[in-house]
Image (tube, rainbow, N blue to C red):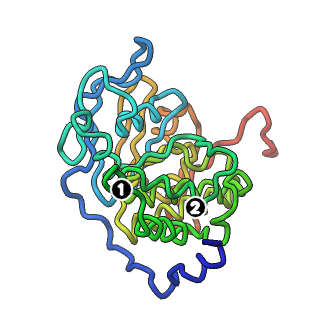
Amino acid sequence: MNAQARKAQAPDAQAHQAPVLEAPVLEAPVLEARGLRLAYDKRTILDGLDLQIHAGTITTLLGANGCGKSTLLKAFGRILTPSDGVVLLDGTPIRTLHGRDVAKKLAILPQNPVAPSGTTVFDLVMRGRNPHQSWARPWSSEDADIAEAAIAATGLTDVADRDVLTLSGGQRQRAWIALIVAQQADTLLLDEPTTFLDLNHQLEVLRLLRRLNRRQGNTVLLVLHDISLAARFSDRLVVLSTDGKILADGTPPDVLTPQLLHAAFDLRARVIDDPVTGTPLVVPEEDDEFSTTTQ
């Protein structure tokens, strides 16, 4: 099916737009870390960590480079085996679950994924249906319909037949997000989904994730470096320290203070209200060496 035919079949985004969900209500955690110890080559990254991720929320992990954000995300995604402790998915130890069953509940997008040359957007997104396949259930027209809907939801119908490598950075990242949308997992884990994107494309990706959360109820767990963007798009911020502990955990206004920024990032900054959203906006203090203030 070509892109024009897909566009004709794609649902009208305005006419079929799902209702916006109310603010999330905290229930039993969909993901939980209990006494988690994570290490690489005998070097401990996180130790004794307890953390709950509740359904229907957007949570962002923040912290200085090397503090263990990506490591923790890999543990939640069952990519990394803990040295101690346990990760629970819907109350069950994730290591005891079959990989296919995990993939039906949880989708993870690593940093800088790369598609083979010649892979179209449609072919890439169809890979999100792999957890639902078996020898008794090959790909079906239903899988194609789900992939088409994911492509439409991410605004890529016009480029569905293009090679992923020919897309802009923002389009390419949306194609990968369409893949995990097609996977139909309730929980989405994304490691630095805005890396190497310009500001407009960063906003494009984060707005898409917020739409998936608010309209479809997806639980979203992110790793981000941009503190102000994290504050704008997250319900909750979890800040990790360089010694593998949780330094702060709460809503963006509660977490982001000058004291916290100094402790977590060794950053001297002010925190003001964003004039557009009212969320916390981090403004670094001027470097004394290059101060332009008239004495």
Relative to 233, residue 74 above or below: above
Residue 268 position within the rendered picture, expressed as x and y whole percent measured from the top left: 59, 37
For the point 40% across and 72% down, the residue is 215
Q: Neighbour class for label 2 at 10 Å: few (<14), some, many (≥20)?
A: many
Residue 256 at least partly seen: no
Q: Nearer the viewer, residue 10 or 248?
A: 10
For the point 49% across and 52% down, the residue is 127
Q: Residue furthest top?
A: 42
Q: Residue furthest bottom?
A: 15
- Quadrant assignment for the N terminus: bottom right
Q: Amino acid at mark 2?
A: Phe
Relative to 188, residue 243 above or below: above
Q: Amino acid at mark 1?
A: Ala
For the point 51% across and 39% down, the residue is 261
Residue 50 position within the rendered picture, expressed as x and y whole percent measured from the top left: 26, 34
Residue marked by disc 2: 122
Residue 28 position within the rendered picture, expressed as x and y whole percent measured from the top left: 18, 53
| Disc 2, SS | helix
Q: Are marks 2 and 1 in contact (CB under 8 Å)?
A: no
- Which image quadrant for residue 23? bottom left
For the point 60% across and 50% down, the residue is 194
Relative to 270, residue 78 above or below: above
What whole-number distance in Å separates the C-alpha atoms at marks 2 and 1? 18 Å
In the picture, measured across the screen, residue 155 lies left or right of residue 55, that is right
Q: Which mark is residue 185?
A: 1
Q: Residue furthest front?
A: 136
- Quadrant assignment for the C terminus: top right
Q: Which mark is residue 38?
A: none
| Disc 1, SS | loop
Q: Earlier in the sequence, mark 2 or mark 1?
A: 2
